[in-house]
Each structure stands twice: as C-alpha cells, then as structure tokens.
C-alpha cells in the first residue's frame, strides 16, 4: 500500500500536462517493458507462450486497464487523497465478490471488521468538500470494484505462473484496453498526447507511477491476495489515504486530523480482522 500510495502524488504532477488516456498507456508500457524480461527469466519462454493469454486479455483489460483509466479520470476530477479514501469501499466490494465465488463464509467477526474498515473510510471522506464527491467518486468506486475483481481473478486463474508472470500477463491485457481507449479518444478529437515537453521531473514521476506504484505494488498485492484472499488484503487499501496524506505533507500540503482519524479507525479494523484470520488459520 505504501508503494501504491506513492503513485497518487506522482499522478497529480503528471495530470497537469498528460491526458488520462496518455498517462495510462505510458504507465503500462513502461511497467511491461521492465517486467516482461524478468517474467521470461523466471518462468521460461515456453510457459510464457503457453499461458492463458485470452483470459488475461479479459481480466487485464477490464480489471486493470479500464479500472486504472477510471481511477486516473477520478483523480483528475477530485484530488489524490480523496480518490485514495473512496477506495475504502474495497473491503466491502471484495467481500461480496468472495461470497459470490464461494471462497469465503461470512463470519460475524469478519463482517464487523469490514464495517469498521468502511466506517474509517467514511470518516476520512467527510474531510473532502461535497463538490468533490460527485461523478469522480462514482468513477473511483467503479474502478475499485473492477480492480478487486481483477486482482481476485489474477491470483486464481493463472496458478502455473509466478507472481510477476501473473501481473505481467494481465498488464498486457490492460495495455490492449489502453490502446482501444486511445483510439476511441483520438476519433472523438480528444487529446491523446502530453500537451507539454516531457522533462526530467516528469520522467521521474512516470518512473514512480509505473514501476513502483504499478509494477512493484501489484506484484506485492497479488501475492497478498493469494495468501489472504482479496477481501482481507483489500482491508489494507483503506490505510492508503493516510500514506498519501503523509507524502503530500512532505510536499507541502496541510495536515488533516479528520483524515488521520479515519485512517486510524481503518488501521484498527485491519489489525483486528487480520489477527482473527491468522488465529483461525492456525486452528485449522
């Protein structure tokens, strides 16, 4: 979550001159360019060729490509902390997905943890101005739901691949979706290229946004989903607004006690829910 949170301030800088669809495409291209050689080295060329590419195009296209596009647009309409806070619905959405898939039985202790986690997100969200919680919030919620589904499917549907392989193959699907979105935007006369020359600062921000906030964080998150389940792993997403706020504070933004309180409530829910889950696993 710390590595994921680092992407929001980076995106805030890039969105000043990058259209969302251009930023999505550049982010995926850079991440894939670094991850593919590592994937081939780890899994071998034959396993790469035999992978479930068709399934990956669907999971990656909608679960990551379209979801990331919606999240970038949502941030452009609001701000980094607000988008990270709205992602607090992730545990609720992820729990529903696991119940539908039959991979989790809902116990009252876990349900309480979900409610406390969402409550923390709502407390933190109350610090945002009402006008920020419009269409941007709807897009962020939709993006969060798609991301939870994509993460669950990535951890479940590609057992023969390494963690890096699972992430990389679905990122390729995300890049295909980005290409479709770019083509559609160009046909509608929208900007699909940066509106200013790319300088050293932007390259640095793009590196953080693509390699740390996307590549590294997704490998870690998919590994966590495989061990904890998408619902429990997504609890940690709710602490991301606090990390974003700390990063923004270092960049000169003001401290917000309401958001800090919301993050504290979420942290309590994470500790309680994961501790109970760990005890249950030991008993089993």
Image: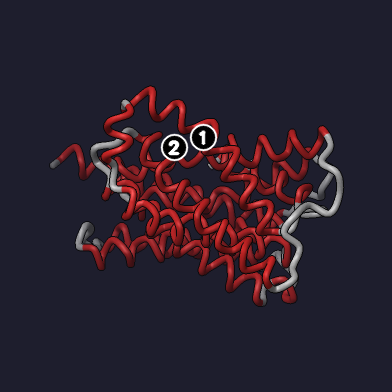
Give x and y (percent) for residue 143. 52, 63
| Residue drawn at (45%, 58%) of the image | 61
Left or right: 130 in relation to 123: right
Give x and y (percent) for residue 73. 66, 64
- Give the image quarter of residue 224: top left
Query: In the figure, 123 relative to 12: above or below?
Result: below
Dot 2, how many residues are within 10 Å of its Cα: few (below 14), some (14-19), or many (20+)?
some
**For the residue labelled by badge 1, is the local secondary structure a helix, a strand or a loop?**
helix
| Residue drawn at (81%, 35%) of the image | 201
Q: Which mark is residue 216?
A: 1
Query: In the figure, 125 relative to 30: above or below?
Result: below
- Give the image quarter of residue 185: bottom right
Left or right: 25 in relation to 163: right
Query: In the figure, 262 relative to 222: above or below?
Result: below
Does the CB distance between marks 2 and 1 fall below 8 Å?
yes
How did the renderer colour the structure? secondary structure
Q: Is residue 40 visible?
A: yes
Q: Which mark is residue 66?
A: none
Q: Quadrant of the C terminus?
A: top left
Q: Which mark is residue 219?
A: 2
| Residue drawn at (56%, 38%) of the image | 31
Give x and y (percent) for residue 116. 45, 61
């Amino acid at each position: 979550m710390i590595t994921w949170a680092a992407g929001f301030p980076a995106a805030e800088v890039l969105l000043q001159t990058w259209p969302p669809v251009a930023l999505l495409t550049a982010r995926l291209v850079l991440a894939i360019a670094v991850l593919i050689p590592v994937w081939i080295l780890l899994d071998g060329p034959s396993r790469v060729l035999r992978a479930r590419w068709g399934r990956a195009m669907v999971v990656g296209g909608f679960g990551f490509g379209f979801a990331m596009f919606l999240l970038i647009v949502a941030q452009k309409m609001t701000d980094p902390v607000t988008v990270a806070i709205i992602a607090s619905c992730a545990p609720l959405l992820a729990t529903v997905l696991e119940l539908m898939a039959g991979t989790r039985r809902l116990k009252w202790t876990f349900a309480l943890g979900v409610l406390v986690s969402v409550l923390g997100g709502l407390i933190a969200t109350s610090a945002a101005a009402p006008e920020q919680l419009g269409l941007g919030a709807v897009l962020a919620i939709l993006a969060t739901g798609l991301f939870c589904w994509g993460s669950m499917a990535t951890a479940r549907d590609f057992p023969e691949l390494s963690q890096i392989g699972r992430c990389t193959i679905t990122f390729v699907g995300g890049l295909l979706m980005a290409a479709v979105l770019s083509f559609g935007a160009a046909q509608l006369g929208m900007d699909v290229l940066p509106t200013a020359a790319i300088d050293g600062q932007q390259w640095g921000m793009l590196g953080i946004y693509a390699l740390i906030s996307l590549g590294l964080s997704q490998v870690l998150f998919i590994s966590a989903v495989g061990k904890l389940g998408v619902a429990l792993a997504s609890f940690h997403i709710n602490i991301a607004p606090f990390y974003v706020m700390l990063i923004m504070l270092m960049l000169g933004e003001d401290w917000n006690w309401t958001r800090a309180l919301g993050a504290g409530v979420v942290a309590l829910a994470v500790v309680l829910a994961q501790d109970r889950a760990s005890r249950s696993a030991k008993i089993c």
